[in-house]
Amino acid sequence: MSKPENWIKHLKHDPLPVLLKKAPLPVRYATVLRFSPDNEELLFKLKSDLEQYQPRVHLLETQQPDGLWEVTKKYGIEERNRAMSFLLQLQNMTKLLDFGCTREMPAIQQGIIGLLKTQKPDGKFPLLLHHHGYALWLLAKYELVGNPFVEKGYRWLAKRQRDDGGWISSSIIPAGTSLQTVKSGIWTTLMILHAFSVHSRLKHSEVSHAAAKFLLDNYLVQNHTTLFSEPDAWDYLYNDYSEDGLFRGGTLRFIEALAPLADFHDHPNFKKAIKWLLDQQLPSGLFPAIVGKSKGGDYGVTLRFYAALKEIERLRT
């Protein structure tokens, strides 16, 4: 196998200066923490600023003693209320992760406990399979790999991997199709692979590798389930905190999920994805939130892509 490409050299512009000078506070902090951790003075200042950052302060102030947040809309079915509480927990714990919070903080520990309490005894989280995968990805980002409840959640998913290497939720398949014969969902599988690829041990598993092969075979294919079925879903690079926005990312999430898996870095579709995204860099040094639609650049997208390229570079040696 040939040595993988050093993609960093193919950037039109170094994005770090614009991320450090102009990005919103959470992105600036994440950039310094990841790429300039020796700049202790700047890191300390940004961390101090983040502790006073109003969106973070508000979230922490509105967190309840049980680690959850109050759901404003109530439903007649209790299971639906629990599911909406779980979704709100995913949204708010993602925000706090982006706002520089770590599991050493008591509020985060309570939030993690609140999230884990939504898990059923068999390891299943509420809602659909992509929600389950996202919960595991989030818990892994909070350094909970190895936690018995988290590991049980991974085992629950592994048992439900289909013969084609992917996953699909029965409630989002097209009308008139059979669950037994329909192809796995592209975006459901991508979210689950992302959870597996950030797991230090399971990223090397056959489950992870089979999912990677499925996704590489389906790069740029239009999804057939109701989750991001639009033809240009691959162009939506951003994430946000909306109910669907958590699972966005398109080609960028595809690259992020595969970046820790060095065995696949030489695959033609992986290289095709990176080359395409490199071509989207704007004169500002930033990358767009939605290719072909966004007028300006997106700081979060830019940081995520640069971090993925650095991870690929790290694994070259």
Image (spheres, rainbow, N blue to C red):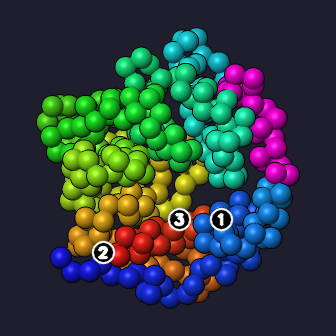
Residue 80 visible somewhere in the drawing:
yes
> Callout 2: few (<14), some (14-19), or many (20+) C-alpha neighbours within 10 Å?
some
- Which amino acid is tagged 3? Arg
Task: Name the residue carrying label 1.
Answer: 33
Q: Position of residue 210 (x, y in %)?
A: 21, 50
Task: Name the residue carrying label 3.
Answer: 304
- Give the quarter of the figure containing the C terminus: bottom left
Q: Work out whether mark 1 precedes mark 2 in sequence or the reverse, and give the earlier one.
A: 1
Select label 1 or label 2 by which is in front.
1
Q: Position of residue 237 (x, y in %)?
A: 49, 62
Could you say whether the residue bearing mark 2 is in a helix, strand or loop? Answer: helix
Q: Is residue 237 above or below residue 53?
A: below
Residue 228 visible somewhere in the drawing:
no
The numbered disc on residue 148 is none
Q: Is residue 301 above or below residue 146?
A: below
Q: CA distance from mark 1 to mark 2?
A: 28 Å
Q: Residue at x 64, y 41 (%)?
A: 103
Residue toward you, 226 or 203: 203
- Which amino acid is tagged 1? Leu
Task: Name the residue carrying label 2.
Answer: 271
The part of the image, by quadrant, that contains residue 315 is bottom left
Residue 295 in the figure: left or right of residue 276:
right
Q: Work out whether mark 3 precedes mark 2 in sequence or the reverse, and give the earlier one.
A: 2
Q: Work out whether mark 3 precedes mark 1 in sequence or the reverse, and give the earlier one.
A: 1
Could you say whether the residue bearing mark 3 is in a helix, strand or loop? Answer: helix
> Callout 3: few (<14), some (14-19), or many (20+) C-alpha neighbours within 10 Å?
many
Could you say whether the residue bearing mark 1 is in a helix, strand or loop? Answer: helix
Query: What segment is highlighted magenta in the picture?
Result: 51-72
Select label 3 or label 1 by which is in front.
1
